Image (cartoon, grey):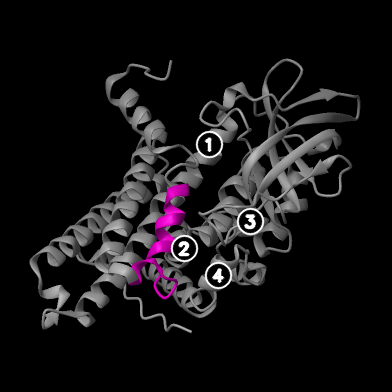
Amino acid sequence: MATDNFQAPDYYQMDDLLTDEHKLVRDSARAWVKKEISPIIEDFAQRAAFPKQIIKGLGEIGAFGSYIPAEYGGHGLDQISYGLIMQELERGDSGVRSTASVQTSLVMYPIYTFGTEEQKRKYLPKLGTGEIMGCFGLTEPDHGSNPSGMITNFKDKGDHVILNGAKMWISNAPFADIGVVWAKDEAGDIRGLIVERGMPGFTTPETHGKWSLRASATGELVFDNVKVPKENLFPTIKGLKGPLSCLNSARFGISWGAIGAAMDCYDTALRYSKERIQFGKPIGGFQLQQKKLAEMVTEITKAQLLCWRLGVLRNEGRATPAQISMAKRNSVDMAIHIAREARQMLGGMGITGEYPIMRHMMNLESVITYEGTHDIHLLITGMDVTGLNAFA
């Protein structure tokens, strides 16, 4: 079993910008990842299995509902703390971060923001500890980047609604106890509702054969005349504003998380470059290898500064969706490029499970696609700076 010797790069002394609480939260998450994730993650990824035993620990380190108020089962932390936790989790594995990101931003956040007091009291405390797990149903087999075209719908039947349709590529679906699902009502408005496992007609078939996010559980949500009580509907939110606000929070977390994956690839390549001898000296002494490492740490530093500033804006309530899109796209693009360069530095060893780089590289192929593809985020930035809509 490999020892986790990770040392985080901090080339511009970013720690000086963090509070003592930020550093305590980050260091606690980092220590937990070293102890609980690093020793097991390669085995679970190779077997394409999710390590369900980590759920309790994720709750204990504040990974579930980190910024949700403590009175509702969260931890009352700020946005930078949330980002730092996501960074450390994705340093371990993107699938682990994805599990926590979904639980916090796509399940707890909408229930806290749009739910009734009864819904908050019923679900949030158990979600915060991991006693129950959730998933988020927006993407459909034929509607990904265009969620407004969704066909999942429900019909009013008095004290309940009847839900029909299907969602695809849903993290946590195979084991989730509840799903925050977005569907159209009879007027064609997009509404949110909470669907519970065990409701007749609700099934969650698992997606198999993935080459990416192999240690994350992915599945479908299938609704066949599911009877959902009216008290499970979010009472007032209508349209895409609801699900997109959830995605803004999740994308913010991804922007930090991808930095963690990049850090791990960089740190692995840096240590390897000092140990691997070719032509009579460490490969880190060759110009082309130093070029790769210098570019890696530069891009990581730029992303750190961008995400820290975005975290400040989020804390102040001033961050825009377009700013979040920029950070998500930049961080993931940066991370996947670093993973590929680091893999080359390790040569043949880079493709083995003895090192984490190939696993990160495969995971990032999903992260660059989900919650807004690279190209979609480019168009969001383009529309923001030009005022012209290129989507249609």
Give neighbour class at mark 2: few <14, some 14-19, many 20+ (Cα, 10 Å): many
Q: Magenta segment, which residues?
A: 349-366
Taking the magenta stretch, the answer to whether it contains residue 208 is: no
Give neighbour class at mark 3: few <14, some 14-19, many 20+ (Cα, 10 Å): many
Query: Looking at the image, do the residues carrying marks 4 and 2 touch, with CB atoms under 8 Å apart?
Result: yes
| Mark 4 vs 2, N-terminal side | 4
Q: Main secondary structure of the magenta part?
A: helix
Query: Looking at the image, do the residues carrying marks 3 and 1 touch, with CB atoms under 8 Å apart?
Result: no
Q: At which x and y percent is residue 362?
A: 44, 55
| Mark 2 vs 3, N-terminal side | 2
Q: Residue furthest left?
A: 287
Taking the magenta stretch, the answer to whether it contains residue 360 is: yes
Say which residue label 4 marks. Answer: 61
Instruction: Residue at 76%, 34% (x, y): give it.
Output: 233
264 to 40, vertically: above or below: above
Query: Looking at the image, do the residues carrying marks 2 and 1 touch, with CB atoms under 8 Å apart?
Result: no
Q: Which mark is residue 245?
A: 1
Q: Mark 3 vs mark 1: give the one in front.
A: 3
The alpha-carbon separation of the residues under discs 4 and 3 comes to 21 Å
Badge 1 element: helix
Say which residue label 3 marks. Answer: 217
The alpha-carbon separation of the residues under discs 2 and 3 comes to 20 Å
| Mark 4 vs 1, N-terminal side | 4
Q: Mark 2 vs mark 3: give the one in front.
A: 3
The alpha-carbon separation of the residues under discs 2 and 1 comes to 20 Å
Amino acid marked by disc 2? Ile
Q: Which mark is residue 85?
A: 2
The alpha-carbon separation of the residues under discs 3 and 1 comes to 24 Å
Q: At which x and y percent is residue 268?
A: 31, 72
